[in-house]
Image: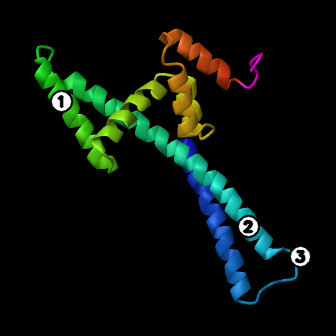
Amino acid sequence: MEGFYATAAALNGLFLEEEALKTALANGDADGSGVDVLGRLFELRLERLGLESKLEAQTTALKARDAAQCLDLQQAMTPPDASAHDRTFTEISTVEEIAGVLTISYGAAGAFITQARRVCALPSVYGNLSSGALSWQGARIIADETEALDHPAAVALADHFLDPDAPNP
């Protein structure tokens, strides 16, 4: 959450800087400092886009973790002697609840939960998504590409791929 808050604070700082520039322009307070106001407004937009992308990845990491954990918690609450029908009903109900909260279809929620579980099972992928260094699309691709591997091999491949100092990247 610290990274999320830091990104949000940096984004807020850029909005405040923009407002100060606009106020100075509106008040005719251009001080002749040589600041290219339009150029700086353009740069602020680019900086904001980068931070918004980072914040989006960080938010998606939180959503992925929570969606995966919702299903795990519901499964843990299901009695061990529950019938297959009851287990299926519990899973369908949980996916429907997540779909409603995220305002997406049942199918999209089911796919998101499946992808979230894969991403969350790869610590380096989830960590990079949480920090905003990796997009959700990138995290999904790595999780999909490692799906056929056993878990230790998938973790090792993801770790290698995301290690900037790895030989033969």
Residue 93 lies, with reference to residue 125, above or below; the image says below
Identified at 54% across, 43% down, the residue is: 57
Q: What stretch of residues is rendered in magenta?
A: 164-169
Disc nearest the viewer among 1 and 3:
1
Residue 41, quarter of picture: bottom right
Q: Which residue is mark 2?
A: 42
Mark 1 belongs to which amino acid?
A: Thr
- Looking at the rendered image, the quarter that the C terminus falls into is top right
Location of residue 161 with respect to 33 vertically, above or below: above
Q: Residue at x 58, y 25 (%)?
A: 124
Label 1 or label 3, whichever comes before in sequence order: 3
Residues tagged 2 and 1 counted as in contact (Cβ below 8 A):
no
Q: Does residue 56 appear to the left or right of 65 in the view shown?
A: right
Q: Earlier in the sequence, mark 2 or mark 1?
A: 2
**Callout 1: few (<14), some (14-19), or many (20+) C-alpha neighbours within 10 Å?**
some
Q: CA distance from mark 1 to mark 3?
A: 64 Å
Is residue 18 visible from the viewing direction of this image?
yes
Q: Secondary structure at mark 2?
A: helix
In space, the residues marked 2 and 1 are separated at their CA atoms by 50 Å
Residues packed near mark 2 inside 10 Å, few (<14), some (14 to 19) or many (20 plus): few
Label 3: element kind:
loop
Q: With respect to residue 76, does 52 lie above or below?
A: below
Q: Disc 1 designates what residue?
A: 90
- Coordinates of residue 45 in the picture (x, y in percent): 68, 63
Residue under numbered circle 3:
34
Numbered circle sitting on residue 155: none
